């Protein structure tokens, strides 16, 4: 089956991100197609390339990036939810006159239309939130 | 609920949070509006404290956020006309459907499962 995940919980604040990641890994291990993870609400913080958790804790941001590289999962971040929370890629940082940027590939800033599109095209859209 | 040729509607957005105190309601409504703008047939279901979103006379709020009342007033423009309200939540909060700012269909607890099953996709906020 073709799956997509909607993640709305911030990493480390709630279980949602950990659960979503484990579900994602289980899907690909079972041979399903995980087309994309869409990050919305506080879930956009999963895309912060500046996250520096203690070394003896799982690194969620890196884990999403690994999942994307190994299994071709697209990582889509709602741009409106991201910008107001300080998550900007190089292009948006330049556009808003910010010195640094906090979102990099394989995460991509995109619109809510992509979420609706995933919900329409995939067999299942599974939501994780606090 | 409105009658359509296809028995299944495209999207049900469930709103469970009050208008002030978090961005859940705002971000849920944003998803509903975008879906409607993309031509999807969208219904809303206000559950729990989410029913207070429909209280009339709301200002933008003390936190300098825009508030959601203006967005709710735009729903008709987006052809979002199926507005379901959890009847049990209404009565628990001492409210009745006729004092809300929009025309809504109260749904009993028993009929909620049917409402969910009538949509291809459900997003919960």
Image (tube, grey):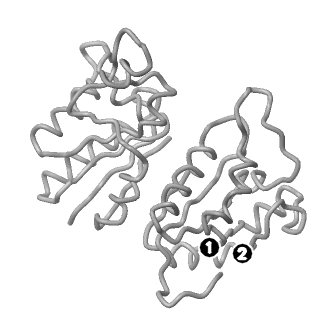
Q: Position of residue A66 (x, y in %)?
A: 15, 33
Q: Is residue B45 above or below residue A88?
A: below
The circle on residue B42 is none
Q: Position of residue A25 (x, y in %)?
A: 20, 45
Q: Position of residue B92 (x, y in %)?
A: 82, 59
Q: Quadrant of residue B111?
A: bottom right
- On screen, residue A27 versus residue B47, left or right, reads left
Q: Is residue A61 above or below residue B55?
A: above
Q: In the displayed orientation, state which residue is furthest to the top.
A: A99
Disc 1: CA contacts within 10 A as few (<14), some (14-19) or many (>=20): some
Q: Which residue is mark 2?
A: B108
Specify the subunit that label 1 lies on.
B
Specify the subunit that label 2 lies on.
B
- On screen, residue A95 versus residue B119, left or right, reads left
Q: Residue at x 22, y 26 (%)?
A: A62
- On screen, residue A25 versus residue B122, left or right, reads left
Question: Quadrant of the image for the N terminus of chain B?
Answer: bottom right
Q: In the displayed orientation, state which residue is furthest to the bottom.
A: B5
Q: Quadrant of residue B103?
A: bottom right
Q: Are marks 1 and 2 in contact (CB under 8 Å)?
A: yes
Question: Residue A80 or B125: which is nearer the viewer?
Answer: A80
Q: Which residue is mark 1?
A: B112
Q: Residue at x 33, y 44 (%)?
A: A20
Q: How many marks?
A: 2
Q: Is residue B116 above or below residue B32?
A: below
């Amino acid at each position: 089956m073709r799956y997509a995940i909607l993640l709305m919980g911030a990493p480390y604040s709630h279980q949602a991100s950990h659960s979503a990641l484990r579900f994602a890994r289980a899907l690909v291990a079972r041979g399903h197609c995980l087309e994309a993870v869409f990050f919305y609400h506080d879930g956009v913080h999963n895309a912060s390339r500046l996250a520096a958790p203690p070394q003896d804790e799982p690194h969620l941001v890196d884990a999403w990036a690994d999942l994307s590289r190994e299994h071709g999962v697209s990582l889509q971040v709602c741009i409106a939810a991201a910008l107001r929370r300080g998550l900007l890629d190089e292009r948006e940082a330049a556009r808003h006159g910010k010195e640094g940027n906090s979102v990099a590939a394989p995460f991509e800033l995109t619109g809510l239309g992509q979420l609706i599109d995933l919900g329409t095209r995939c067999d299942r859209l599974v939501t994780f939130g606090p | 609920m409105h009658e359509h040729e296809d028995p299944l509607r495209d999207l049900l957005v469930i709103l469970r949070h009050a208008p002030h105190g978090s961005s859940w309601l705002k971000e849920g409504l944003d998803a509903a509006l975008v879906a409607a703008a993309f031509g999807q047939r969208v219904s809303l279901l206000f559950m729990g404290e989410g029913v207070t979103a429909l209280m009339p006379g709301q200002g933008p709020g003390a936190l300098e956020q825009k508030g959601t009342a203006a967005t709710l007033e735009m729903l008709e423009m987006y052809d979002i006309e199926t507005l379901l309200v959890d009847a049990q939540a209404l009565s628990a909060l001492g409210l009745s459907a006729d004092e809300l700012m929009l025309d809504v269909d109260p749904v009993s607890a028993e009929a909620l499962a049917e409402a969910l099953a009538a949509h291809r996709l459900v997003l919960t906020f």
